[in-house]
Image: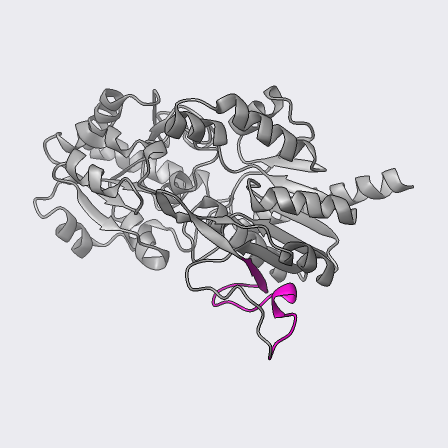
Amino acid sequence: MRVVIVTESFPPDVNGVAHCTLQTARHLARRGHEPLVVAPATVGAATTSRPDLPGIFEHGTPEPGAPCPVVRVPSLPLPGYPQVRVALPSRRLTAALTAHRAELVHLAGPFVLGVRGMAAAARLGLPTVAVYQTDLAGYARTYLGTGANTAWRRMRAVHGAADRTLAPSTAALRDLTEHGVPRVRLWPRGVDTARFRPGLRDEALRRRLAPGGETIVGYVGRLAPEKHVGLLTGACALPGVRVVVVGDGPGAPSLRTALPGAVFLGRRTGDELARIFASLDVFVHTGPYETFCQTVQEAMASGVPVIAPAAGGPLDLVDHGRTGLLVPPLDARAVAAAVGALAADPARAAAQGAAGRAAVGGRTWQTVGDQLLGHYDEVLRDRTAVAA
């Protein structure tokens, strides 16, 4: 099957959309399909054709670590958040669909480039599968204080045009359905249980992070307003607790002030990140707008108990009292109380971590990748039936 994946983000970007897109492309290639990725250009990426390689950007170019050719379209950094790139209008998208002889278009978190991908697919008569990944309404409330209804109108228009929308959690599926998005199905995310595993726990690293033998409580993710990492303030004040923050973003400077005593490690990826995860005693996610929350699943795979808000994606992942603790969203006192409870009872924390590892054992990218291929097949069959 020849699939073009149109994504708002792709490595070297570090975020949920980029990671899921990379894993999707890898699985398609492993299964013998022919994926092509279209994504915004990153800093330093070439965006103009080379005379010695005519048509290279229409057909895609190899990139380190990418499992398939990648077409980059011109982009600009989002004002105030340069880590996010916004694609500019470009003919390369339609050219890529045509040159690749696409049979299906996969839209990863469609917002700007994905909207153009949807329009191009419609013009070419190609079926589309749109993957819902970002709670734009929640972001609008965070950054603008308003605009949630406008965000939902945009999402309804984009996803309503797709042959199928895939929601990553039951909460996201319910939100989409309640806001009038048709043809929604559940498609969760996988986790690399070989990379993220309890055996990577590193006592030397733990001594560097918490030289006094403190309970190490970690957060991994973007440092941005919508993540509400400042809710860890109360945890920082608990005796015998060391908060460790992994990630980068526009909120980093203010958080260094708001979280006294916390250790900020910056952005970490790959095996180094897996070693950090496994070396935590407790993982805390603070953001209430997660459609899935991949870092919760990675912590569970690492054998670490999870504290997360009882909202969105974590509701599917955290079994309260068995694999971690769910707390009311945006409640700093509840976060601190949950951290204190697990820090005071290491045996309970260890049991929840072990249960978490067991719970995600079957959620590999291979398993969910095959589920995605099932969705593709159904969409193609439905198109064929309509045409007949």
Q: What colouring method underlies this structural image? A: one colour
Query: As rendered, which of 319 and 93 lies closer to the eye?
Result: 93
In this view, 380 is above or below 199 = above
Prevailing secondary structure of the magenta residues: loop
> What is the quadrant of the C terminus in the image?
top right
Q: Residue, x 61% and y 66% (percent of image)?
A: 57
Q: Position of residue 15 (x, y in %)?
A: 42, 47
Q: Residue at coordinates 26% horizontally, 52% vertically from top-left?
A: 201
The percent position of residue 330, horizontal first and vertical second, equals 32, 23
| 214 on left or right of 177 | left
Left or right, 178 with reference to 245: right
Q: Is residue 53 magenta?
A: yes
Q: Which residues are the magenta region?
A: 52-73
**Camera-side residue of 120 and 267:** 120
Q: Position of residue 194 (x, y in %)?
A: 43, 55
Q: Quadrant of the N terminus?
A: bottom right
Q: Is residue 312 magenta?
A: no
Counting every numbered tag in the picture gives 0
Q: Is residue 305 visible?
A: yes
Picture residue at 65% right of the left edge, 64% below the top: 58
Residue at x 52% of width, y 50% of height: 87
Q: Residue furthest right?
A: 388
Q: Position of residue 322 (x, y in %)?
A: 37, 29
Residue 310 versus residue 166 in the image, above or below: above
Farthest residue toward the left?
212
